[in-house]
Every structure is written in structure tokens, then in C-alpha cells.
Amino acid sequence: MSFTKRNAVLSSARPGQAPAQVQAKVETQLAPGLRPSPLDGRPTTSTGTASLDQLLAGHRGLPLGTCLLVEEQGTTDFSGILLRYYAAEGLVQGHQVHLVGFPPEWKYQLPGVAEPDAKSRTAQPSAAAPEERMKIAWRYEALGSAASAGAAGKGESNSGATFCHSFDLSKRLAQSSCKGALHPTPSTGPPSLTERPAPSASPLRAIIKHLKSKLESSSPNEVHRVVIPSLLSPALYAVQCTQPSEVLQFLHGLRALLRQYSNQLTALITLPASLFPRSAGLVRWMELLCDGVVELIPLPSIPGAAPPPSSDKKVADQPQGLLKVHSLPVYHEKGGGSAETSAWRETLSFSLSASKGLNIKPYSLPPMEDELQNEKSPASTSKTGMDF
């Protein structure tokens, strides 16, 4: 027969010693614009494009300490729009944005924060009362909170703050919305006719020194973003910057800073694939030095065609190009993704609108005209002249 008292916690404390107090877990508060990855818990930040965040290997954002290379074919500027969203998101979240190649006036080209519509405000359900619970079974009570948490994870962080803002290309970013600062880097442009460049000066090495000094002098809680538009373009960079020794050393130095400040720094790089195709050996080396590589292939437009009306949603949602994912960040033995992120292996397309921004989704062929006519007039398919 056991004389142990039921429902009593057994402790190994000594008779004269007080029981140990349970220490509460102190959660480290993340900086604004950050949230832990659902895969491995590493801090991630938003690229400013929600569909691109969903594509990045299941992390639902760009992990800190990584860089993303966006290649674009043709003469369009879809990759430049991704850069503007990336920089605008950093300024709104209070991050330090370092701009390469462009002057500081580039800040006035950033899109403004979109205001939520009245329909979306009314469509959002209010917070449920604590007494409103599922009455099917007690074990299903957690399903509602889990579903709401998954839906909120697309646009909000755990603290309730907005993780990815919505921007409007028809507006400009107001000074009141900027909580961060834009830091221009040393000029990389070709010298003018009156100036003589120094033979030993390297603009790309000066940028690495500038970034290193800024990171060393900043606090460990500050988040930095590096914006590198149209790398190796002759319009923004000097001729010596296109040398393989200069470019590869620059990317090696940037990669070293990303690994050294793995909780503070991210980078987004664009590359004109028409000038530097993937078949070149230099581009392949550049891809190996980046954590993720994405290629944008705009669809050819019809010459002489009138622009589509802005009110037609079907025309606005039509794909404007294809997207190829060549590599994504991998951090563990699972491969860096889950079943939900296997869609990047399919053929992806993107469309651009002023209010929704750049939207990435699986590519599907539009329906044929005969099918559309049959849907509009189903009575025409019935046989006529039948006697009953």
C-alpha cells in the first residue's frame, strides 16, 4: 500500500532549503520589421513584396545575413521596382538603407504606403470574445487560433506590428512615414571628361569600407539593408568595375559582411541579363557568391497595342512575365523548404499593378475564346427544333 499523497509534486529539495522558483522565459524582443522564421527560428525581414516573401524557401521573408540576386532580361525595369519596394519597406520599418550607384535623390522615387480600403476594413473580422469558443470538442479550440495566426503571419509579425506593408506606385513615400535613413555610398559612376580617375582607386572596394565602418559604428539592434541596382551596368559603374577581379572581390567582401553581421544585414542586387547573360562564366561565379538567384523574363508586348484600362481586373491580372528560381537559401538538412514552398519548382509568372505591386503566382494559360462564349451563353449549346 502506497502512502504517497496524490496530486502532490515530488521535489528533491532539502528540508531546510526553499523550493526553487520557476524562472520565466525571457523572450528576446526583435527589432521592428523582423520576425522568426517558421522553419528554424532565425530572424527574417520582408522584401516589401509579399509574394516574394512567400517564395523564399519557406522562411516567409529574407533571412538576415543573406543576399538575393535578381536578374532581368530585356529593357524593362521590374527588378528596379523590387528594389524600390525593398528600400521603402526598410525606411518605413526604421532600418538603415545603403544605396549604391544612385544619388540620394533616388529616395523621392520610392512608392508611398497604400491606405487600406474601406471594404478591407469592414471585411476584417473583429477580435472574438473569450467566451466564443468552438462547441464541438475541447480539442478543436486551438484550431481557430492557429488558423488566424497563419493568416496573420503573411502580413504581421508576432508582436502585432506590420511585417510587410502595401505600397502604391502612384504615390510617393512621405517623409512622415520614414523612420529609417537613406545613406548614399561612394560614387561608382564613370568619371567626367574633366576629371582624371586615380589609377589605384576602386569604387567597389570603397563601398565595402564604407559599409564596414557604418556597421561597426551602429548599435547591434539596428538592421541595415544594401540596395545595389543594375550591377555592372555602364550607366552606373565605371569601366574598371566590370573587371572580374573587381566584381568578385566586391561580392566576396559583401558576403563576408553578411556572415559577420548575420543578425543585422541583408542585401538585394539586380543584374541586367541582356548585357551579362547567364552563359558567361563571370555571371555564374556571381551567382555562386549570392544566397538566392531569381530571373525575370518579361513577355513580349504587342507593338501598337493600346494600354489596358485600369478598371478591368482580368486584364490587370494577366501575367506580364515569367519568373525562374535558380537557387534559394538552404540552411538545414531538410533543404530549406517545405511542401508549401514546392510551388517554386513550377512555372511562375508575375504581374504588376499600381495598387497590388508585383504579384508572383503560378503561370496558367488563359481560357480560349470559345470556352468564354459558351460560359456567357449556355442556352446556345442546347439543340433547337426538338419536339416533345
Image (tube, rainbow, N blue to C red):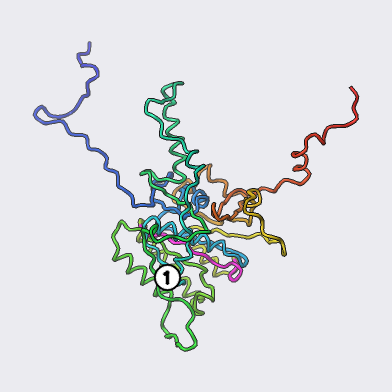
Drawn side of residue 386 relative to residue 355, left or right? right
In the displayed orientation, state which residue is furthest to the left: 16
Q: Is residue 27 visible?
A: yes
Residue 265 among magenta residues = yes
Question: Which residues fall within the magenta stretch?
Answer: 264-277
Image spot of residue 232 (x, y percent): 52, 72
Drawn side of residue 65 relative to residue 343, left or right? left
Q: Which residue is mark 1?
A: 104
Q: Is residue 56 visible?
A: no
Relative height, residue 143 to residue 302 (above, below): above
* Residue at x 71% of width, y 61% of height: 305
In the displayed orientation, state which residue is furthest to the top: 1
Q: Quadrant of residue 20?
A: top left
- Observer-nearest of 269 and 107: 107
Relative height, residue 280 to residue 238 (above, below): above
Q: Quadrant of residue 249?
A: bottom left
The C terminus - image quarter: top right
- Observer-nearest of 244 and 317: 317
- Estimate how packed mark 1 is, as few (under 14), some (14 to 19) or many (20 or more) residues with alpha carbons within 10 Å: some
Residue 236 among magenta residues = no
Drawn side of residue 329 relative to residue 217, left or right? right
For badge 1, the amino acid type reads Pro
Determine the secondary structure under disc 1.
helix
* Residue at x 54% of width, y 73% of height: 233
Please count the marks in the image. 1
Relative height, residue 305 to residue 101 (above, below): above
* Residue at x 52% of width, y 69% of height: 230
* Residue at x 52% of width, y 66% of height: 285
Image spot of residue 246 (x, y percent): 46, 75
The N terminus - image quarter: top left
- Observer-nearest of 254 and 284: 254
